[in-house]
Image: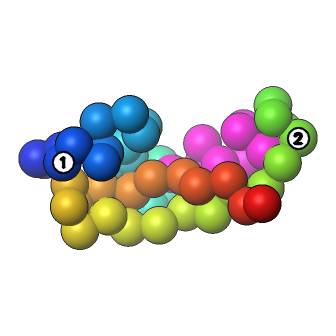
């Protein structure tokens, strides 16, 4: 998996399932909602907070 400069500061997940599991924890921990999206720059999955 090649990370681009944009992805360096983001946590990258290898599968959508892994990202979904983390989203559940992150929403509980941070008390806010997150989207999951596929990144074609690094071929991984990231979370993005919903504002």
Callout 1 crowding tier (Cα within 10 Å): few <14, some 14–19, many ≥20: few
In the depicted structure, whether residue 38 falls above or below residue 45? below
Q: CA distance from mark 1 to mark 2?
A: 29 Å
Q: Which residue does the numbered mark 1 point to in the structure image?
A: 4
In the image, residue 49 lies at what x, y percent? 68, 53
Q: Residue furthest left?
A: 2
Callout 2 crowding tier (Cα within 10 Å): few <14, some 14–19, many ≥20: few
Q: Residue at x 30, y 48 (%)?
A: 6
Q: Are marks 1 and 2 in contact (CB under 8 Å)?
A: no
In the image, residue 31 lies at what x, y percent? 88, 41
Q: Residue at x 55, y 63 (%)?
A: 36
Q: Nearer the viewer, residue 24 or 49?
A: 49
Residue 35 inside the magenta-drawn segment: no
Question: Viewed as shown, does residue 35 lie left or right of 27?
Answer: left
Question: Viewed as shown, does residue 30 lie left or right of 18?
Answer: right
Question: Residue 31, labelled with which disc?
Answer: 2
In the image, residue 20 lies at what x, y percent? 58, 55
Find the magenta span and give its range: 19-27
In the image, residue 26 lies at what x, y percent? 71, 39
Question: Viewed as shown, does residue 48 lie left or right of 26?
Answer: left
Question: Residue 49, labelled with which disc?
Answer: none
Quarter location, residue 11? top left
* Label 2: element kind: loop
* Label 1: element kind: loop
Res 15 visible: no
């Amino acid at each position: 998996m090649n990370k681009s400069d944009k992805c360096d500061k983001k946590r990258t997940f290898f599968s959508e399932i892994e990202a979904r599991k983390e989203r559940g924890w992150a929403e509980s921990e941070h008390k806010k909602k997150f989207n999951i999206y596929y990144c074609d720059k690094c071929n991984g999955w990231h979370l993005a907070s919903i504002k």
